[in-house]
Amino acid sequence: MFTNPEKLTGLLAGKVGLVTGIANRDSIATGCARLFAAAGAELAVTYLNEKAKPHVAPVAAEVGAGLLLQMDVQSDDEMAAAFEAIRARWGRLDFVLHSIAFCPKDDLHGRVTDSSRAGFSLAMDISCHSFIRMARLAEPLMKDGGCLLTVSYHGSEKVIDNYNVMGPVKAALEASVRYLAAELGPKGIRVNALSPGPLKTRAASGIDHFDALIDAARERAPARRLVDISEVGAIATGLVSDFSTGVTGNIAFVDGGYHVTD
């Protein structure tokens, strides 16, 4: 656990960030938002719909978010409106955290071989292409450069039992990180991905036999423990800060070393 957020004081002072993908207080995006705020950033936070809002609003209040915006990434209008609200409030954007993924249950729990066209397409659209769409909307607001962050998982590189169709989807997301980094780099916009180890979040609970995945990570990681959302947030804060101006196109593992084991 990252226990000294005061060490980050002032690291993001004067920066404006957008945090998407908060589901509740235990989300990866929540851990990042808390550390961004501790480091001095002003934040806009999004929620999916009115059903989700009561779970996101307390986190937005906790981090002192200047804007709480409804944004379903399947709605071009809602995405455009969210970025326009940021432009109207601050006139710029310094960083974005994209922590959004979805796959229909039947496709997530089945073999990749058996995945439906509709399910695969939906998972790719929400989990991967939405990041590209955010990059396109953020680009004109990052006049002085900035940083785009997304969230991946080691199942993009290795076959992880029961991760199934999300493996190819996250592989596409990581490839998108590299291509966006190359395209936006001349404008001073950096693009990176976080790759946390297994965490007990609401999103992860949809994976079959997730408890076994958690146990394996705890036993095999060199650190012999799981990471938590504050540790992911600390790395995210460093990546969007000016201490990481030379870092782009990277996948940052935050998993206690789990990815180096068999």
Image (cartoon, rainbow, N blue to C red):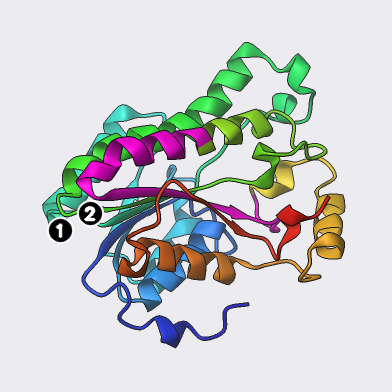
Pick whichever, 77 or 239, lies toward us: 239
Callout 2: few (<14), some (14-19), or many (20+) C-alpha neighbours within 10 Å?
A: many
Q: Helix, strand or loop at disc 1?
A: helix
Query: Of the numbered discs in the image, which one, if any, rests on residue 136?
Result: none
Q: Is residue 20 left or right of residue 198?
A: left
Residue 180 within the magenta-colored segment of the rendering: yes
Q: Magenta segment, which residues?
A: 175-202
Q: Can residue 86 be seen in this snapshot?
A: yes
Image quarter in which the N terminus is found: bottom right
> Can you identify the residue that label 1 sits on?
90
> Tag 1: residue type?
Trp
Crowding at mark 1 (Cα within 10 Å: few <14, some 14-19, many 20+): some
Of labels 2 and 1, the one closer to you: 2
The residue under label 2 is 93
x then y, percent, for residue 49: 43, 42
Mark 2 touches mark 1? (CB < 8 Å): yes
Distance, label 2 to label 1, CA atoms, is 7 Å
Residue nearest the observer in this picture, 198 or 53: 198
